[in-house]
Image (cartoon, rainbow, N blue to C red):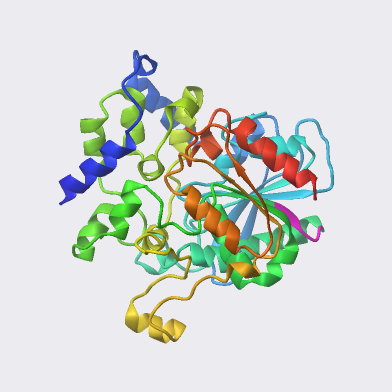
Amino acid sequence: MKVTILILVVSMAGYGYSKSEKEQGIDLKLLQAEIESWKGIAVVDLIRSDGYPAENHYVTTEDGYILNVHRIPHGRNGKRNGKVAFLQHGLLTSSADMVISGPGKALGYILADEGYDVWLGNFRGNRYSRNHTHLNPNWGAKFWKFDWHEMGVIDLPAMIDYVLNQTGVDAVYYSGHSQGTTSFFVMGSLRPEYNQKIKVHVSMAPIAYMNHMTSPLLRMIAWWSKPADALFSLIGMNEFLPSKVFSAFGKLFCTTGITRILCENSLFAICGFSPGEMNSTLFAKMMAYTPAGASTRQLLHYGQEIPTVFGHFRQYDHGLIINLAKYGKPDPPEYPLSKVTAPVYLIYSKNDWLAATNDVKKLYSKLGNAKGMFLVEDHGFNHLDFTYGQYAYKYVYSTVVDVFAKY
């Protein structure tokens, strides 16, 4: 069973990336060494090395998680417009996503140069927020008993309140990618008072409804019918830790330099990648900062959204008995998206394995204050291209800047 599933996952992850001349002459050992050299550089040091000021901040949530938030108070030009931007990363990533492409191309830097005071959030469980007042992530399951529901109802409100308190503004300009949008919709639905603390929200590759998504790994999780312990042996019991079988099949099916490393990276196995947007000069840096960590429940919760005829965006399904005790009914409740009253804009693409066009359109129809949808011009644009694509600044970030400027 492991062999059959992972042949599917890894071979599909490499789909569309042929053994072209782009991969010829790559010294794999040198590339791996470069990846290792980047791993020792923290995000604040990366930001400073790019010529921007950077600060470390720590936010303790009501349930004890200690979240590391990074700040770029202004750009290299010193311009300040009095506005505060809050950027939130996606699944299995970190605040590094918002600066990794470098000056002039990364959203965090672009906004800082526009004069924004930029704050970069980190959700519980990733490499920068792997801390708690009394729980140890390396001991037992308690630390990892969360998913993107807790990120929406606890982490985001805590970080936003902290940012407002530190800056003195009454609302932030929010843009999120992937899970950074999911958690926003959870917050806006269940903590509606926070809609007033958002000037405008721009979703990049928004995820809520998922029954049209095509990611092979998430579909495997969604339709798993074998014993649960077999699934957990593949993806991890508490922390999401894909087994070494990923690496073995990556070497078997993706035999050339860049493709081989991509296939061994669980983030790219879940989300896919597009050759046209792959920036080879950033490759080592991308691999060094991803995957950045997650709980297995984050993946399971997404997987629960998939195998439904009409599609759901609802809370975690604990099973009949716990659902009855926790929710008072056999099925988990839907998130009331009509309560998301902050102005929302969605940016989506046609080649997104996680945010399918039909699902994005359904999300748009359910929101309480949807203002606009933007389809990325490049129809080969993938889920991860919103943060790592070499033309993301052109296709996506220019729209974020324009929308922010309206409010």
The residue sitting at 30% across, 57% down in the picture is 221
Residue 124 location (% of width, % of height): 51, 59
The residue sitting at 54% across, 31% down in the picture is 378
Q: Is residue 116 left or right of residue 205?
A: right
Looking at the picture, does residue 123 appear above or below residue 368? above
The residue sitting at 57% across, 71% down in the picture is 336
Which region of the structure is painted magenta?
169-173
Residue 327 location (% of width, % of height): 45, 82
**Camera-nearest residue between 47 and 324:** 324
Q: Is residue 3 left or right of residue 263?
A: left
The residue sitting at 79% across, 55% down in the picture is 167
Residue 157 location (% of width, % of height): 64, 65
Q: Is residue 122 left or right of residue 162?
A: left
The main secondary structure of the magenta stretch is: loop
Whether residue 164 is visible, yes or no, is: yes
Is 6 part of what is drawn in magenta?
Answer: no
Q: Is residue 348 left or right of residue 319?
A: right
Looking at the picture, does residue 306 appear above or below residue 128? below
Which quadrant would residue 370 be assigned to in this image?
bottom right
**Camera-nearest residue between 56 and 298:** 298
